């Protein structure tokens, strides 16, 4: 049953230009299956929060239909919809205790006192809140408030859980912890969940599917793998993670993939494409930094640790995809990040793993850069 | 995709129809505002243009021909301007000293500076007469001067500065405390001297606040009635008193109304300036928790000079209030200062009706006014409906309309059918309720802006309808603001005179009106005793509300009432 959005459009009056209007959400359609965890991801102002508020009923769509559990709910106010929201600011009632906050929704439903207490206690046990039951909200840490907000939403057993950037007020470590916690709870209860965030790592961690939005439009809907490795367009490729773009012309179509003659004259195979290319089409090839392989060119004799870097295998044809000079090195412990001057407009980004064993380059080192077909993905140039 | 404004109206009306509760409340509030605020004002305007042959400018031509009436207008403008400038200056010095230096007795200075705000505004005038008048303690008893000319410009300006500078002080203290000390630290860190920091950072950031304080003081002084009635004298006529005398002395409603309109126009202008221009220029430099104010920005010499100025002001206030206290116990002020209780016996005997009436009227009207204020604040901040701006403007209008104008308006409006209310308790209650809603609205709006709308959305999301959300979530969160608004509304109701003096009757009388008539008949002892009791009752009420809040909300409750 889940949630279905059909051609949702939302138009607001423009606060900066009286009399004009801005389109916050444009023709958004998606079908969220029961028990599925779907995340709306995008930069601020992309319409993701508006979409969430349309589902919860705090905004009415200008056009389109909202379906929850097989029922069209366009005209239902938020209190009549079977959704529970976890707010960005948590929105814990400051005048009620933790237990009273969690029991608020049950009380409104008119459940008997005993039932309310039992349900509240059960959820508090699951969420590790039992010993905070009588605390006031201003005596809670950010993480605890977050758990109360989640418990308060879940205890009502809604058909749909809605999350509005719930982790953005937490520090990095707690955020990582809560991501897993949210995913665990959602799996435990099997509640259909819709989540809004601008943090792509968060989206990748929790979601079954991700909806990438920009300027009110859906740019792509897909699994975390598809969004990251098989982006539909330049925006998605650029917005999610870091990326290298290489331009070229399709010379040959090979099954799912293509052969591309890149603008600097080198030919490579690309294993996946976002559209059906024809020979002669211009293509934009996406390669993630961690998919680039760095090799010391045979001519250069490295020094010190960087000599170890030659353990990378040399491509069969002997000619690297691109040659360049290491410009910047950021050693992060588990990985090493490089900016490489390949004689192009933008530096080439590369990441190598396990630097202590694999070794790493120094600024000024000359390197050959290459990638395997499977890690490359072709988009139409004009996407 | 451009839509006309008309469709937004249509949408808002449709939304209102779909919410019967909201519709009822909006309808009730709007119509009551029209009847009890706007209608009397419209009648004042209409009456001032009334001539035997219909409508015209005849009354105004008469007024402008009368040098005496015109002088009253200019005197009022001059007095209000001087009080605005002088009072804001003293208020700023006081606020700056108490917020930026570590002088001793800060808390005590603060409390003493607040006293004029919580006491009847004409106490200054009374005390000045007792100190400098014909039987004045200083002029007659100490210096042996007979008939020192304290009546008129000098005495009145002194009384007005003393009465109204605390309002500027409270406003500007808020402004100064909201200037993040880190800004001053930064300026100093960048090499600014203390004087440069003050001149280039602190002062410019305070300018909108100072302008705002000046406009408020201008409005208050224009509207003030008690001090000029006692002190202005016939040589220095003041507009509000002239309007009152036209109506009660000469029974000339059109001329009284015309004077009221002349009184209203400058006040409204100042109010509109304050609300739509100055308040937009206010800077917000503090986000989150207030940082401790810094003490090092004032040079030690400057500090002690400021201390001296504040001490002088504080001593003057004490002198004024102790004079009243002494006067309440003195046998015959000025000639026989031996202590006696006879004035209190008088108040608790003959005058006790007025005490009971005052308490009844204030006790009933303030909570009602407070609740109405909260409802309006809620509607204005959280709801969308047609007429919202009208509601906000009209309900806040009472703040700008001088009591004299409203008093005359009520006489005109409720002396004849359809609503005959003169002489009843109702007219006093209604007047007080609608006159003091701005106090409740202001504190209500302030707290609502602090309540994250998501908190109410969470309640709705969890299944609460509009009524339950308001009752279970919004209202409990507004209670502290309600009480703190209640205190100020109560103080204002207890000390009200300018409008009420038109509305009292033999059935319902007020202590303030009693005090005025005692002063006019030269019975300063009884007037003082009344004043002491009045201030005493106000203090008891404040401490009771404060105690309730402290008990219920702990430290937070105490903070809400920064008195």
Image: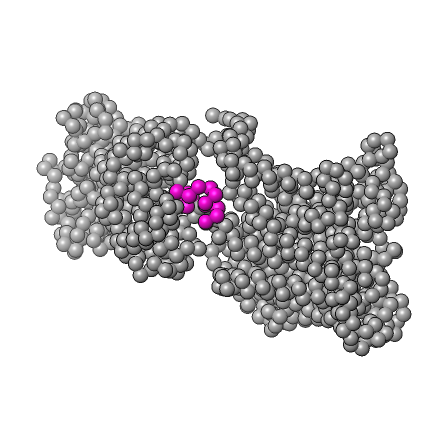
Residue at the image point whose x is 83% and y is 31% from the top: B54
Whether residue B441 sits left or right of residue A98 in the image: it is right
Residue B27 in sight here = yes
Residue A150 in sight here = no
Question: What type of secondary structure mainly makes up the magenta span?
Answer: helix
Position of the N terminus of chain A, as image quadrant, is top left
The single residue placed furthest to the bottom in the displayed view is B338
Residue B463 drawn in magenta: yes
Position of the C terminus of chain A, as image quadrant, is top left
* Nearer the observer, A235 or B219: B219
Residue B101 drawn in magenta: no
* Nearer the observer, B465 or A221: B465
Up-down relation of residue B554 to residue B44 (above or below): below
Residue at the image point whose x is 81% and y is 48% from the top: B243
Percent coordinates x, y for residue B244 in the rendering: 81, 49
The stretch in magenta equals B457-472
């Amino acid at each position: 049953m889940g949630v279905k959005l059909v051609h949702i459009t939302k138009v607001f009056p423009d606060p900066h230009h009286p009399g004009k209007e801005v389109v916050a959400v444009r023709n958004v359609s998606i079908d969220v299956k029961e028990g599925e965890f779907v995340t709306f991801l995008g930069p601020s102002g992309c319409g993701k929060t508006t979409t969430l508020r349309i589902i919860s009923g705090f905004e009415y769509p200008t056009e389109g239909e909202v379906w929850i559990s097989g029922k069209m709910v366009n005209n239902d106010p938020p209190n009549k919809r079977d959704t529970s929201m976890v707010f960005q600011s948590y929105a814990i009632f400051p005048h009620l205790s933790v237990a009273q906050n969690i029991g608020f929704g049950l009380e409104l439903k008119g459940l008997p006192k005993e039932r309310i207490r039992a349900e509240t206690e059960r959820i508090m046990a699951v969420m590790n809140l039992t010993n905070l039951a009588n605390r006031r909200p201003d005596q809670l840490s950010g993480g605890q408030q977050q758990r109360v907000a989640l418990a308060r939403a879940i205890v009502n057993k809604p058909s749909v859980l809605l999350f509005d950037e719930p982790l953005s007020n937490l520090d990095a470590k707690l955020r990582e912890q809560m991501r897993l916690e949210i995913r665990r709870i959602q799996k435990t209860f099997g509640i259909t969940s819709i989540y809004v965030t601008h943090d792509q790592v968060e989206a990748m961690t929790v979601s079954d599917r991700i909806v990438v939005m920009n300027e009110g439009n859906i740019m792509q809907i897909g699994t975390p793998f598809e969004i990251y490795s098989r982006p539909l367009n330049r925006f998605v490729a650029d917005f999610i993670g870091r990326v290298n773009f290489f331009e070229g012309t399709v010379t040959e179509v090979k099954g799912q993939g293509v052969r591309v003659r890149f603008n600097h004259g080198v030919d490579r195979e690309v294993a996946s494409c976002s559209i059906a290319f024809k020979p002669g089409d211009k293509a934009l090839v996406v390669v993630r930094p961690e998919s680039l392989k760095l090799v010391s060119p045979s001519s250069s004799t490295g020094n010190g640790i960087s000599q170890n870097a030659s353990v990378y295998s040399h491509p069969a044809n002997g000619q690297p995809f691109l040659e360049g000079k290491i410009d910047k090195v950021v050693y992060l412990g588990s990985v090493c990040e490089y900016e490489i001057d390949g004689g192009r407009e933008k530096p080439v980004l590369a990441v190598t793993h396990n630097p202590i064993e694999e070794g790493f380059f120094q600024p000024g080192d000359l390197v050959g850069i290459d990638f395997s077909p499977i890690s490359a993905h072709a988009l139409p140039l004009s996407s | 995709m451009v839509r006309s404004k008309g469709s937004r109206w249509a949408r808002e009306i449709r939304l209102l129809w779909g919410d019967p509760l909201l519709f009822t409340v909006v309808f009730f509030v709007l119509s009551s505002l029209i009847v009890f605020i706007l209608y009397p004002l419209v009648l004042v305007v209409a009456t001032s243009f009334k001539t035997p042959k219909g409508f015209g400018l005849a009354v105004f031509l008469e007024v402008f021909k009368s040098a005496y009436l015109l002088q009253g207008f200019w005197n009022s403008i001059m007095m209000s301007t001087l009080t605005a400038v002088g009072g804001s200056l003293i208020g700023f010095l006081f606020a700056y000293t108490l917020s930026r230096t570590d002088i001793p007795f800060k808390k005590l200075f603060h409390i003493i500076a607040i006293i004029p705000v919580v006491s009847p505004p004409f106490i200054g005038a009374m005390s000045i007469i007792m100190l400098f008048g014909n039987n004045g303690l200083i002029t007659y008893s100490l210096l042996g001067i007979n008939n020192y000319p304290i009546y008129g410009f000098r005495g009145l300006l002194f009384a007005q500065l003393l009465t109204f500078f605390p309002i500027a002080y409270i406003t500007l203290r808020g402004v100064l405390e909201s200037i993040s000390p880190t800004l001053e630290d930064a300026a100093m860190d960048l090499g600014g001297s203390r004087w440069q920091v003050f001149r280039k950072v602190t002062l410019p950031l305070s300018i909108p606040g100072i302008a705002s304080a000046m406009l408020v003081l201008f409005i208050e002084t224009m509207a003030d009635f008690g001090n000029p009635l006692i002190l202005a004298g016939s040589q220095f006529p003041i507009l509000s008193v002239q309007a009152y005398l036209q109506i009660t002395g000469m029974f000339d409603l059109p001329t009284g109304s015309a004077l009221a309109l002349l009184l209203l126009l400058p006040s409204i202008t100042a109010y509109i300036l304050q609300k739509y221009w100055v308040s937009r220029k206010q800077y917000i430099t503090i986000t989150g928790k207030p940082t401790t104010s810094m003490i090092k920005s004032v040079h030690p010499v400057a500090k002690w000079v400021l201390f001296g100025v504040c001490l002088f002001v504080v001593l003057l206030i004490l002198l004024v209030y102790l004079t009243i206290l002494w006067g309440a116990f003195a046998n015959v002020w000025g000639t026989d200062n031996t202590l006696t209780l006879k004035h209190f016996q008088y108040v608790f005997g003959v005058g006790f009706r007025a005490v009971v009436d005052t308490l009844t009227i204030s006790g009933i009207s303030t909570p009602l006014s407070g609740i109405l204020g909260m409802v309006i604040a809620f509607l204005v901040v959280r709801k969308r409906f047609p007429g919202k701006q009208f509601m906000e403007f009209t309900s806040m209008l009472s703040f700008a309309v001088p009591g004299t104008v409203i008093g005359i308006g009520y006489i005109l409006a409720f002396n004849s059918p359809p609503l005959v209310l003169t002489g009843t308790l109702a007219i006093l209650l209604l007047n007080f309720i609608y006159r003091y809603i701005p106090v409740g609205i202001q504190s209500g709006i302030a707290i609502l802006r602090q309540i994250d709308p998501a908190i109410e959305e969470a309640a709705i999301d969890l299944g609460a309808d509009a009524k339950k959300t308001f009752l279970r979530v919004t209202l409990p969160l507004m209670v502290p603001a309600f009480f703190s608004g209640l205190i100020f509304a109560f103080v204002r109701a207890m000390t009200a005179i300018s409008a009420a003096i038109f509305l009292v009757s033999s059935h319902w009388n007020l202590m303030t009106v009693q005090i005025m008539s005692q002063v006019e008949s030269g019975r300063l002892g009884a007037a003082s005793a009344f004043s002491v009791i009045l201030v005493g009752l106000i203090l008891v009420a404040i401490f009771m509300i404060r105690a309730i809040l402290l008990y219920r909300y702990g430290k937070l409750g105490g903070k809400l009432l920064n008195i």
